[in-house]
Image (spheres, coloured by chain):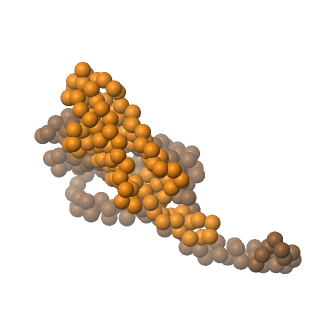
Amino acid sequence: MDLNSVRTTRRETLGLAAIASLAALLAPRMAVADEGAVAAEIKKLYGDKKFDSGKLRLDVPEIAENGLVVPVNVEVESPMTEADHVKAVHVFADGNPQPGVVSYRFTPACGKAAASTRMRLAQTQNIVCIAEMSDGRLYMAKSNVKVTIGGCGG
Amino acid sequence: MATKPTPRVRLPASVKAGELIEIKTLISHDMENGQRKDASGATVPRKIINKFTAAFNGKTVFEADWNPAISANPYQSFFYKAQESGEFTFTWKDDDGSDYVTTNKLTVA
């Protein structure tokens, strides 16, 4: 229906509004990962292994005004030697359409196991971070980020 | 993609041996996440940079696998312990198969 050329009557306008609101109700909600999806991703990587806390610091803002650009900084305490270093760090978000955010692989040459980037968050959610050490130890850190405007582009 | 992705890297020009340096990288890229719809309602296909690699004198020192959750114009910083002079090679891998590569010299005094 071309709204520019046809003058809509009051009845038509109301009818259109009714259809629009109905469509909004029926439209499937944006598919979103959940804690289960994050847990499944972690299980795929590490099976049922236990996670320790500490050593790993996940730096995210408490409140993100713009979900399109949320700084995320991770840092792991480690001497970063050939015998004892951080192998990998994974970051997940449980309220995004896909749980994965970023996976880092460090080498002893890095000297310090820290990295920063910027991520998109669709809504208020938990960020889960996992660090894998060269000897197989695993660490986990979690943080909640309140998102004022979601960054999903939808 | 409106413009060709331009990588930018910031690192100190000259460092002491054993010094820990922070390397900051930025590349212009839309990072189309595959969730957005265009004006006609069709889904805009995913096109992101899915991998960032930093190598020093040909040896990989740091890698990052990026998912669609990484913001447009992705920023990445990481650390490196300078031991010898040489050259960094930074590579960004696009979903469409192209590589964006830039090199930076590091001089250890």
Task: Report the front residue among A48 and B10.
Answer: B10
Q: Residue at x 14, y 39 (%)?
A: A82
Q: Residue at x 42, y 39 (%)?
A: B8
* Residue A58 in view here: yes
Residue A48 against residue A148 in the figure, above or below: below
User: What shade has chain A been given?
Assistant: brown
Task: Report the front residue among B79 and A50.
Answer: B79
**The quadrant where residue A92 appears:** bottom left
Q: Position of residue A152 (x, y in %)?
A: 53, 58
Residue A38 against residue A71 in the figure, above or below: below
User: Is B16 on the left or on the right of A119, as rendered?
Assistant: left
Residue A69 against residue A93 in the figure, above or below: above
Q: Quadrant of the N terminus of chain A?
A: bottom right
Task: Report the front residue among B27 and A135.
Answer: B27
Q: Residue at x 23, y 62 (%)?
A: A47
Q: Position of residue A126 (x, y in %)?
A: 43, 53
Q: Position of residue B25 (x, y in %)?
A: 39, 39
User: Is A104 on the left or on the right of A67, as rendered?
Assistant: left
Q: Position of residue A95 (x, y in %)?
A: 46, 59
Q: Residue at x 48, y 58 (%)?
A: B32
Q: Quadrant of the C terminus of chain A?
A: bottom right
* Residue B75 in view here: no
**The quadrant where residue A24 appears:** bottom right
User: Is B67 on the left or on the right of A12, as rendered?
Assistant: left
Number of numbered callouts drawn: 0
| Chain whose colour in the figure is orange | B
